[in-house]
Amino acid sequence: MVEASTVNILANKVASTSSAVPSVHSPAVTGTKDAAQKPLGVLPTMTARMNGLLMKTATRTLVREESVPRDPAAGVLKSPKVVAGPTKIETRGLNFYYGKTQALMDVSLEIPERSVTALIGPSGCGKSTFLRTLNRMNDIIEGTRITGDVLLEGRDIDDSNIDVVALRKRVGMVFQKSTPFPRSIFKNVAYGPQISGCRDRRLLAEIVEQSLRRAVLWDEVKDRLNDSAMALSGGQQQRLCIARSLATNPDVLLMDEPASALDPGSTSRIEDLIFELKEKYTIVIVTHNMQQAARVSDWTAFFYEGHMIERGLTSRIFTRPSEQRTEDYITGRFG
Ligand SMILES: Nc1ncnc2c1ncn2[C@@H]1O[C@H](COP(=O)(O)OP(=O)(O)OP(=O)(O)O)[C@@H](O)[C@H]1O
Ligand SMILES: [Mg+2]
């Protein structure tokens, strides 16, 4: 567990932040009075890092918490902002093998709809493998085997009756490295609807515009839709790939380190975009950036050596993780 003194420091930091953002109710604010009596500075590095994370989380969550009723006596929110919606995707006892190598061990995880779930953990722990099991992208890798269940709205996606192409339209994927086709911006976005049989130019134009608007790219490209997608910047290409996924009208977006190759400005735009998209979509994002996980996600799941060690509200995982390994990872002791 996080040391009591650390909880206290976090609480102080939130309290001081709270003068500017009084409505934030973080679990850290509920740090015990006993903790306040104990000496500070036991884990200065960890504390500094976590303070940074929490401050950013606190600032970001304000926007989402404003409409939640307050407890006038306490002066803070009565309940945490994130209320788990219905489960969109659930894995039960998932095991995954590359040949004889087992990459996922007994992973059971619920992903609530219209929320952002961040998958974190050190390199090689199985985050990308897990993400790919959610739309059967691992099927295309030779010699792999899966046991256990992946349920999309309660239906097993490994069922032999499932149409895999339709599944991947419902569960879209955005990769770490943007992967536009060497075609025009328009054709990149229109590709999905076109291969689904949409031939109506006007309808395609509408879908392209709507998808580019949702991906917050429209204003930058509306006058050059016929230019090559390869001429866009890295950040624009990544938003184009998001628009391309949105064009097939998915329910779920899987994002594997979508901003890891981008500069801070583009990263921030992608994060803002994720924040807006979750109004409509269920998002699962893999990230190595702890601040990003703290900023954009509602839920966080920590993976380690193929196991899902712990999952909970992001605000709790980053302040009061239940497992020592989670704490060690998010505070930078390994990974
Ligand atoms: N195509 C593959 N064939 C064989 N083994 C693989 C393959 N892809 C991944 N693995 C192995 O499966 C394990 C999990 O890999 P995975 O890519 O899911 O990790 P990750 O958590 O996404 O790592 P990173 O943070 O570096 O992207 C690793 O041991 C990796 O070497
Ligand atoms: Mg990966």
Image (tube, rainbow, N blue to C red):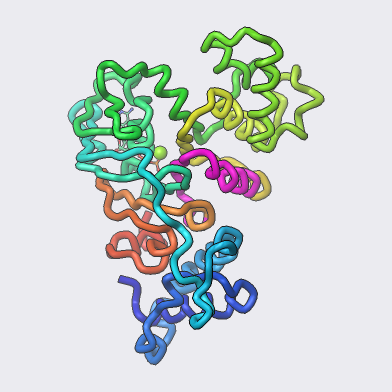
- Viewer-closest of 184 and 29: 29
Dividing the picture into quadrants, the one containing residue 92 is top left
Ligand 1 is found in the corner quadrant, namely top left
Residue for point 81% across, 25% down:
223
**At which x and y percent is residue 191?**
58, 16
* Magenta stretch encompasses residue 270: yes
Residue 305 visible in the current orientation: yes
Left or right placement of residue 223 versus residue 296 in this view: right
Position of 153 relative to 118 (above/below)? above
**At which x and y percent is residue 275?**
57, 48
Residue 260 visible in the current orientation: no
**At which x and y percent is residue 277?**
57, 41
Residue for point 71% across, 14% down:
202
Dividing the picture into quadrants, the one containing residue 38 is bottom left
Residue for point 36% across, 59% down:
329
* Magenta stretch encompasses residue 23: no
Left or right placement of residue 149 versus residue 136 in this view: left
What's the magenta region?
267-291
The quarter of the picture where the C terminus appears is bottom left
Counting labels gives 0
Query: From this viewpoint, which residue is outermost toward the bottom?
Result: 37
The quarter of the picture where the N terminus appears is bottom left
Position of 211 relative to 122 (above/below)? above
**At which x and y percent is residue 172?**
47, 29
Residue for point 63% across, 34% down:
239
